[in-house]
Amino acid sequence: MLAVLVLAAAGMLSAPAGSRAAKPPAADVHDGGQVLSSQAAESFQRKLMELSGPVSARESLKPIVVTDTEVNSYFKYDRLAVLPSGVTDLVFHIKPDGIHGAADVNFDTVKPSQQSANDFGTRILASIFTGNQRVTAVGKLASSHGSALLTIQDVHVGTITLSDWLVNWLLQTYVESQYHIDLSKPFLLPANVLRIEFAPGKAIFVRGRETKNR
């Protein structure tokens, strides 16, 4: 269930752009006060390619700024194929304290990985969270020297606030075992990205030529 936030906040920031879905018409869409457009989606795609592409020795490493309007446009017009079925209406708001995310999740469609499907706790949880629910969470990203650590906090499913231990259990059950990632450990940022700074409505990728172990 939380893969929608983890994959977007961690995988999308540290990996090349994913596959593209068929585009709807390029008309602007007003969503949560933002004007979403295919042009903004293409801008985000270009920035992802620039972040993940090679850099020449003489190229100026200026910061790359990504706005939440570009991110939300990307998910509106070029939805990543990696997102699980049953996840819709995905919205991100970038704030100084991190990435605030929300999505509609159909718990009858989103399933845990096979290796945890027979777990008693998983079956109990599946009996509690059913049907369509609005899931919200905050992703706090601490970054320096070319690596970052993502922490998921303040998770709500509908009107229910999840405790920290339950959030960690859900991440292990639905995300880490299925996508083979360990969110308790730092991950490398794209080459030449030293850190990510957050401001209202934008994430700033600060770049430099610091050497990383890859």
Image: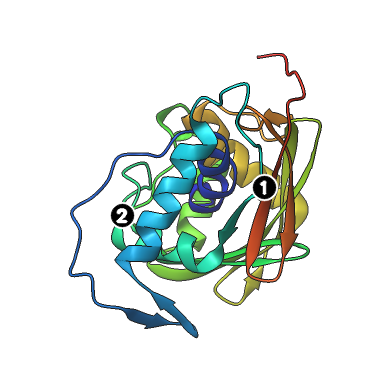
43 relative to 15 in the view: left or right: left
> Which residue is painted at 65% across and 57% down in the image?
203
Q: Are there few (<14), some (14-19), or many (20+) residues within 10 Å of tag 2?
A: many
- The front one of 137 and 74 is 74
> Which residue is painted at 41% across and 39% down in the image?
17
Question: Label 2, label 1: how many angstroms apart (C-alpha)?
Answer: 24 Å
Q: Is residue 30 above or below residue 53?
A: below
* SS at mark 1 in the image: loop
Looking at the image, tell me whether mark 2 or mark 1 is earlier in sequence order.
1
202 relative to 180 in the view: left or right: right
For the question of whether residue 152 can be seen, the reply is yes
- Amino acid type of the residue that numbered disc 2 sits on in the rendered structure: Asp
* SS at mark 2 in the image: loop
- Amino acid type of the residue that numbered disc 1 sits on in the rendered structure: Pro
- Of discs 2 and 1, which sits in the foreground? 1
Q: Which residue is mark 1?
A: 63
80 relative to 66 in the view: left or right: left
> Which residue is painted at 56% across and 26% down in the image?
55
- The front one of 50 and 171 is 50
Q: Which residue is mark 2?
A: 78
Query: How is this picture coloured?
Result: rainbow
- Give the image location of residue 83, x and y in percent: 38, 47
Q: Are marks 2 and 1 in contact (CB under 8 Å)?
A: no
- Give the image location of residue 166, x and y in percent: 69, 51
Disc number for residue 194: none
